[in-house]
Image (cartoon, rainbow, N blue to C red):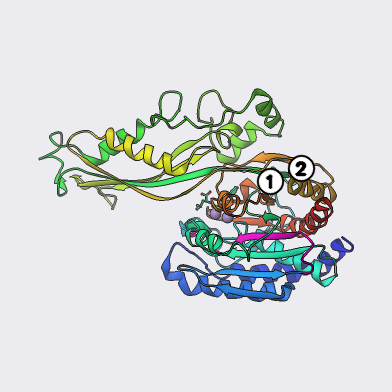
C-alpha cells in the first residue's frame, strides 16, 4: 500500500470534517421522531460511497429504515470483501450528563487521547468506525490500489435489532455473495495493545410486567394485605442469581461451551489491570460469577442484567401508594451454542413459575441473536493480523468481546461466510453512554490499517 501515510496526512482535515458532518445528523433509530434524520443519513452515506469510488450505489428500501448498498467490482475472478456497518445511533439520553451536545461534535483531548477525540453520539458506534472503511476505499481507488472487489452494506437499524436486514440478507444472497465479511463495530484493548475481536455474545432481551390489584391502592389501607407488584418483582429478579452469582433458570447453562484450561490460560495472557479497571469505574470491588476472572465474566460466560425497572410513584416528594403494576427490561448475554429463542422460552417458563399467587406475570420477548466466534486459523483473521502488524508494529491479540452484533451469526447461517471484526474503539469511548467519543488517532489508524487487510486477504486467497 504505497503512500497511505502521506495520503492520510494530506487529507486528514477533510477526513475529520466529513465525519463531523455525518455526526451532526441525529440518526436515532429507536425514536420515530427522528425518522427524517435517519433517512437523511442514509442519503449522505450514499453520496460518500459514490465519491469514494463505488461504481453503483443504491438505497434499498425495507419495511423499516433503508440499507445503503454499494459495490466496486474490478474482476469477477478476484475475491470480494463485504463491508458491513450501521449508520443509526443510540438515543443520547440522559442529555444533562453530556459536557457538549451529542449532535454538535467537538474535539477534546484527554489522557487516553492526547491527539484529541471527537465527542458525539455515534462517533465510535458506529459512524466513525464505519466511515473509516469509506475513506480506506477512497484511498485505494484514488491511488489505483484496490486489489479485489468490494461491496458495502450499511444499515440503519442495528441498534434496534436488525430485523429488516435479516430479511434483506435472506432475499439477496446472490447480490451479497462474497468471500469474507469485514466489520469495524467493536473495540481493541489499547492503542499500544492491538487486538482483533474473535467472539461476540448472543442476546435475549425481554420485558416483564407484574400486575397485582386492578388499581393503585392506598398503602396504609391495603399495605401488608395484598401483594405489592414492585416488592414481588424485586424479589423475583433477586432470585434469578444464586449466592455464587450463577443464573438460577433451570437449563440455562445446559449448552454453554466450557473452555479448556489451555484456552483460558491463553486468554489470560491479554494485558489487564484490575486496579485500573476499578479506578476507571470508581468501584471498590468487581462483582460476578464465582470461579471466573473479570475478563471471563464479560466474554465467555452468559449473564443476566436488569436494564430498566419502573413502577409506582417517582415524582417529587412522597406518595403513599401500592402500584397496580411493576415492569422491568431484562437482557441475557449468551455464549456460543446457547440458542437465544430457547433461552427466551426457558426464561419465560421460569419467570412465570416463580410468581406467587396474588400477581399475574407477563413476559414479552423483544429481539435477540446468536453468539459468534471466528477461528484464528481463518485466512481473514490471518490477513487482519498481518495488517495490524504492518501499521501497529505488533501482532494483535485475539480477544472475545462481551457485546453483541446479532447479524454476524445470521451472515454465517445464510451466506456461510465468516466475519472479521477489526474494531478500533476503546472500552473507555463511552458508547451508548453520555460523552461518547472516538480518538482521532484511532480513526486515522483504522483508515491506514484497512487497506492492508484487502491486500493480504487477496494474497492469501490465491
Ligand atoms: N457495536 C455494538 C456492539 C459491540 C460494541 C460489540 C463493542 C463489541 C464491542 C452494537 O452497536 C451494539 O450496541 N449492539 C447491541 C445489540 C443490539 C441488538 C442492540 C448490544 O451489544 O447491546
Ligand atoms: Mn455498533
Ligand atoms: Mn451500539
Q: Position of residue 339 (x, y in %)?
A: 48, 41
Q: Is residue 190 magenta-colored?
A: no
Would residue 89 be visible to someone looking at this image? Answer: no
Would residue 364 be visible to someone looking at this image? Answer: yes
Which label lies toward us, 1 or 2? 2
Q: Which mark is residue 340?
A: none
Q: Which mark is residue 188?
A: 1
Q: Which residues are magenta?
A: 74-92
Residue occupying image coordinates x 66% and y 61%: 177
Question: In this rendering, would 132 be left or right of 202?
Answer: right
Q: Position of residue 449 (x, y in %)?
A: 78, 55
Residue occupying image coordinates x 53% and y 53%: 432
Instruction: Name the foreground residue: 220 vs 354.
Output: 354
Q: Which quarter of the rendered image does ligand 2 occupy?
A: bottom right
Residue occupying image coordinates x 33% and y 34%: 350
Query: Is the stretch drawn in magenta largely helix, strand or loop?
Result: loop
Q: Residues within 10 Å of mark 2 (few under 14, many from 20)?
A: many
Instruction: Name the foreground residue: 406 vs 227.
Output: 406
Quadrant housing residue 455: bottom right
Quick one: label 1 or label 2, which is nearer the N terminus?
A: 1
Q: Position of residue 207 (x, y in %)?
A: 35, 47
Q: Position of residue 387 (x, y in %)?
A: 80, 51
Instruction: Name the foreground residue: 168 vs 372.
Output: 168
- As displayed, is residue 5 above or below residue 291? below
Give the residue pinned by disc 2: 396
Helix, strand or loop at label 2? It is loop
Helix, strand or loop at label 1? It is loop
**Number of callouts:** 2
Instruction: Name the foreground residue: 201 vs 289.
Output: 201
Amino acid at each position: 500500500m504505497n503512500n497511505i501515510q502521506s495520503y492520510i496526512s494530506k487529507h486528514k482535515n477533510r477526513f475529520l470534517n466529513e465525519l463531523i458532518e455525518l455526526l451532526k445528523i441525529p440518526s436515532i433509530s429507536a425514536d420515530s421522531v427522528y425518522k427524517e434524520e435517519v433517512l437523511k443519513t442514509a442519503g449522505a452515506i450514499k453520496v460518500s460511497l459514490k465519491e469514494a469510488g463505488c461504481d453503483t450505489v443504491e438505497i434499498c428500501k425495507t419495511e423499516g429504515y433503508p440499507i445503503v448498498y454499494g459495490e466496486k467490482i474490478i474482476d469477477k475472478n478476484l475475491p470480494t470483501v463485504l463491508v458491513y456497518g450501521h449508520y443509526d445511533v443510540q438515543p443520547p439520553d440522559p442529555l444533562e450528563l453530556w459536557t457538549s451536545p451529542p449532535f454538535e461534535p467537538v474535539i477534546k483531548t484527554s489522557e487516553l487521547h492526547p491527539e484529541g477525540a471527537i465527542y458525539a453520539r455515534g462517533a465510535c458506534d458506529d459512524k466513525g468506525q464505519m466511515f473509516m472503511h469509506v475513506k480506506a476505499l477512497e484511498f485505494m481507488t484514488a491511488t489505483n490500489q484496490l486489489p479485489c472487489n468490494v461491496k458495502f452494506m450499511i444499515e440503519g437499524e442495528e441498534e434496534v435489532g436488525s430485523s429488516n436486514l435479516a430479511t434483506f440478507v435472506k432475499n439477496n444472497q446472490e447480490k451479497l455473495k462474497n468471500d469474507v465479511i469485514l466489520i469495524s463495530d467493536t473495540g481493541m484493548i489499547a492503542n499500544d495493545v492491538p487486538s482483533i475481536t474473535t467472539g461476540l455474545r448472543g442476546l435475549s432481551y425481554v420485558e416483564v410486567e407484574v400486575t397485582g390489584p386492578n388499581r393503585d391502592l392506598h398503602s396504609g389501607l391495603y399495605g401488608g394485605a395484598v401483594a405489592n407488584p414492585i416488592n414481588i418483582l424485586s424479589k423475583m429478579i433477586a432470585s434469578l442469581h444464586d449466592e455464587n452469582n450463577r443464573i438460577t433458570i433451570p437449563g440455562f447453562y445446559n449448552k454453554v461451551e466450557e473452555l479448556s484450561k489451555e484456552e483460558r490460560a491463553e486468554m489470560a495472557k491479554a494485558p489487564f489491570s484490575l486496579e485500573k479497571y476499578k479506578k476507571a469505574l470508581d468501584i471498590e470491588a468487581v462483582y460476578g460469577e464465582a470461579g471466573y476472572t473479570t475478563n471471563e465474566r464479560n466474554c465467555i460466560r452468559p449473564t443476566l442484567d436488569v436494564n430498566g425497572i419502573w413502577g409506582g410513584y417517582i415524582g417529587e416528594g412522597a406518595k403513599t401508594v401500592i402500584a397496580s403494576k411493576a415492569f422491568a427490561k431484562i437482557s441475557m448475554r449468551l455464549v456460543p451454542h446457547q440458542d437465544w429463542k430457547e433461552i427466551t422460552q426457558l426464561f419465560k417458563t421460569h419467570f412465570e413459575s416463580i410468581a406467587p399467587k396474588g400477581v399475574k406475570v407477563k413476559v414479552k420477548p423483544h429481539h435477540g441473536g446468536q453468539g459468534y466466534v471466528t477461528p484464528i486459523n481463518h485466512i481473514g483473521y490471518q490477513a487482519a493480523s498481518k495488517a495490524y502488524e504492518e501499521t501497529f508494529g505488533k501482532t494483535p491479540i485475539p480477544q472475545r468481546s462481551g457485546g453483541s452484533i446479532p447479524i454476524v451469526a445470521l451472515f454465517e447461517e445464510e451466506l456461510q461466510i465468516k466475519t472479521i471484526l477489526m474494531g478500533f474503539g476503546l472500552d473507555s469511548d463511552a458508547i451508548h453512554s453520555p460523552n461518547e467519543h472516538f480518538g482521532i488517532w484511532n480513526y486515522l489508524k483504522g483508515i491506514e490499517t484497512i487497506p492492508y487487510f484487502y491486500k493480504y486477504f487477496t494474497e492469501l486467497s490465491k
